[in-house]
Image (cartoon, rainbow, N blue to C red):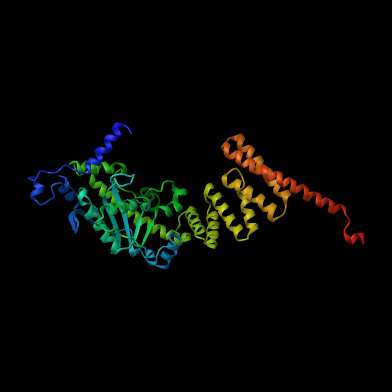
Amino acid sequence: MSSTAQGDKFSRLAALKPARKSRGSAAATRGYAPDIPEGSDRLAQLLGASTARTAFGEHLALRRWFPEPDEPENSPVSRVAMGLLAPNAPQEASDPRQWLFLDTETTGLAGGTGTYAFLIGIAWWDAGGLEVEQFFMREHSEEHSVLAALAERMAERRVLVTFNGKTFDWPLLDTRYRMARTVKTPAPRAHLDFLHPARQLWRMRIGSVRLADLERKILGWRREGDCFSELIPQYYFDFLRGGTPDPLVPVFYHNQMDLRGLAGISTRILEVVADPENHGTHALDLFGVSRLCERRGETTRARRLYSRSLEAQLPAEADRAARKSLALLAKRGGDWAGAVKLWESVAGDTREGWEAYRELAIHYEHRAHDPLRAAGIVRKALAELRRANRLGTMAAPAYRARRADFEHRLARLEKKAGRTLLERLEFESCPSAAESN
């Protein structure tokens, strides 16, 4: 690490212990602790926030209600969706009224014991809209109060809902609770992380599945007045050092928008997963739910949705993947004619195509007992391989590995085909028992 980078790191750590005010300051005469940053009053005024108190101290709190998104119904549809998304979750996970959305703004993205969640946002559905509450740590000693406030809310709604929270937000908060010691770590009954189903449904369709991108491309929302995530830690450090609190106002809005986006995306995912044929807007929606069904062992529904997605004209890459998966499901179900037809449709110079050649060779050798036809398929695959190598469409290691596999298979098949052909010739040249009599 360079001396400049190391100095910047220590500067940030030092900022977590802000300079104390003089005891004669205006803040001290109003009863504030002497180490609350100078801009705290202005920040509260800009946001319309107030000081909240717990058994462990004080912190800044803000509460707002938004008229959207609408709360999904607690219905059999939700339970069908949750059966795919989280099959092992307890029953209350299917009831959106038990959900508590969570998003944090932190002093860094690396995690670990030196990272603090200085702003914790939570939300829940209430009165036909979304209630958002935010807890802000004006300086380090207020962390216990913020964690206590969060624990109280988590006791009221036991199903935690996040976006990448299983990887980042919750492990970070769990660490902070364990380090605080005085506040017991809350234990959610279930934790639903909607990043993973969002990837499953929409990554192939829209590329990036950042929450803001999902809002724009899936929900049709557009954020206004948002801030850059990478600058958020610096805004907080500047505030702790006595800088203006104004840049923190968009950070609160950013956190609110993340919570609203999470609520909207979770509702959309429930709708699409439960009934993709009516709520899906793209062939890739059907394809994404097909993969979820396949992963959960719902093979009948997976085959139906894969077929529907192919009828709806998938993009080329997804089309090949759907045919590969559908062929595998047909094979497992004993539908060999269907599997062969799908393998033949996808065989070629693609990852799925080479697997299709291999599956066809295996089928004709071992199940159809036709080594001559299996050998013909392998020769065709080798010719395709040589062509791909000449055109440079395949990496050299992959070419060598596939060529070795197909050449080894062909050598065995030619021996087997030779024996089969010899047996046929011998049979045809010898009179049958009936003719000899």
Q: Position of residue 86 (x, y in %)?
A: 43, 60
Residue at horizontal 63 percent and vertical 48 percent from the top: 358
Q: Position of residue 419 (x, y in %)?
A: 78, 49
- Vertical side of 109 occupied by 391: above or below: above
Q: Which part of the image, by quadrant, shows the N terminus?
A: top left
Q: Which part of the image, by quadrant, shows the C terminus?
A: bottom right
Tell whether 11 sits left or right of 206: left
Image quadrant in which you'd find residue 242: top left
Tell whether 274 sits left or right of 49: right
In the image, 417 versus 5, the foreground residue is 5
Q: How many marks?
A: 0
Q: Furthest-right residue in view?
A: 437
Residue at horizontal 63 percent and vertical 60 percent from the top: 335
Tell whether 421 sits left or right of 165: right
Residue 129 visible in this rendered orientation of the protein:
no
Q: Position of residue 238 (x, y in %)?
A: 22, 41
Q: Position of residue 354 (x, y in %)?
A: 60, 45
Residue 150 visible in this rendered orientation of the protein:
yes
Q: Furthest-top residue in view?
A: 3
- Vertical side of 430 occupied by 376: above or below: above
